[in-house]
Structure formats: C-alpha cells, structure tokens
Image: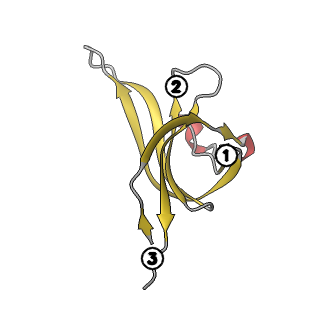
Amino acid sequence: MKRLRAEFVSEPIVVDSSSIQTGLLAEGAPGCPRRFTWRDQVHNVVQILDTDKQLRAYDSREKYVKSHSFRVRTDTGFEMVIRCDRQVRGNPWRVFTVAKLVVLPE
C-alpha cells in the first residue's frame, strides 16, 4: 500500500455524533469521530494513526489549545487529517488534508 501526496482541502465535515469517543471529553479534548460525511460520502475511521494538538501562542506561560487533529485511515481508502477547531462556532470539524491510498502490485 502506498500513500499519495496529501492535498490540503480544509473543508467542513458532518460528524455522526453517536460515533464520537467520549473518553477524552473529561480531559477537555474531543474524541475522534468514527464516522463522518465529507463531499456527500460517508467515511468510517478504521484506524487512528496519530493525534496532535495545536497551541495558540501568547506572551504568557499559559498554553491554550487552539485545535485537536487526528490522522486517520478510512474504509474509503483515504488517509486524512481531521481537525476540531475550538474557536469555531457551530461545526468545528474539518477535513484538513487528504491522501488517497493506493495498492501497488507486488
């Protein structure tokens, strides 16, 4: 399996709220949604590859988390970075980058 170069898209997704893992909510972090719709297609997360958070810079020692990112593999053959931006009102979820996974012949 090979991953093509990631494309920056930054487009909103519609998260299936029943698919969000709630374990991290107690720590103030969103859980990674396991199912969402992007470009009128339902995507199911089959693997979470990485997690990250972006901090908003200030001149103080206080660190405010601006957004949380999840690099995921979907059942539709994509590797995506989906992001929850804490400063966005309404729907904070976006697909940030997308790479199509390609199976190479052996």
Q: Are marks 2 and 3 in contact (CB under 8 Å)?
A: no
Give amino acid for label 3: Leu
Residue under pointer 2: 86
Q: Dot 3, crowdedness within 10 Å: few (<14), some or many (≥20)?
A: few
Q: In this rendering, which labeled residue sits more in front, label 2 or label 3? A: 3
* Residue 51 percent across, percent down from the top left: 44, 47
Give the residue drawn at x 48%, y 46%.
Answer: 70
Residue under pointer 1: 36
* Residue 48 percent across, percent down from the top left: 51, 56
Residue under pointer 3: 104
Q: Which numbered disc, 2 or 3, marks the residue that appears first in the sequence?
A: 2
Q: The C terminus is located in which quarter? A: bottom left
Residue 103 in view: yes
Q: Which numbered disc, 3 or 1, marks the residue that appears first in the sequence?
A: 1
Q: Is residue 59 left or right of residue 4?
A: left
Residue 74 badge: none
Q: Dot 2, crowdedness within 10 Å: few (<14), some or many (≥20)?
A: some
Instruction: Look at the numbered disc 1 and give the secondary structure of its residue.
Output: strand
